[in-house]
Image (cartoon, rainbow, N blue to C red):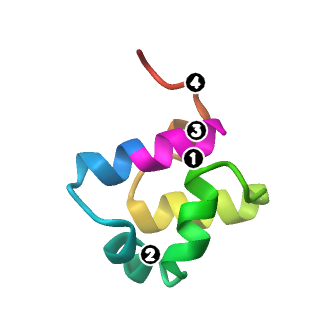
Amino acid sequence: MTLGVNLRAERHRRAMTQESLAEQLGITSRYLAGIERGERNLTLDSIEVLAAELGVDPHSLLAPPRR
């Protein structure tokens, strides 16, 4: 769930829609929505690829969200 919350926050920070971010990442918007809702379990390798595509540190996607 933390990954999804952080990914959604990063997407909002960039003022992107799910569709536009999914296109950038080369995945479907439905799959991205599943990640954001915590319905998809990604491997560490997948998280590293996702972070690289976003240009962020993988740890920032896994760290507890700031309140």
Are there few (<14), some (14-19), or many (20+) residues within 10 Å of tag 1? many
Other-residue count near label 2 (Cα within 10 Å), few / some / many at <14 / 14–19 / ≥20: some
> Label 4 sits on what residue type?
Pro
Q: Amino acid at mark 2?
A: Ala
Label 1 is placed on what type of residue?
Answer: Gly
Picture disc at residue 59: 3
Q: Which residue is mark 4?
A: 64
Indicate left or right for 18 with 1 as reference.
left
- Relative height, residue 13 to residue 25 (above, below): above
Front label number (3 vs 4): 4
Report, in whole angstroms, how far the alpha carbon at label 1 lies from the one at label 3.
13 Å
Q: Earlier in the sequence, mark 3 or mark 4?
A: 3
Q: Which residue is mark 1?
A: 4
Question: Residues under labels 3 and 4: Cα distance?
Answer: 10 Å
Which stretch is magenta?
A: 1-8
Please tell me the numbered disc located at residue 22: 2
- Picture coordinates of residue 9, whole percent (x, y): 38, 42
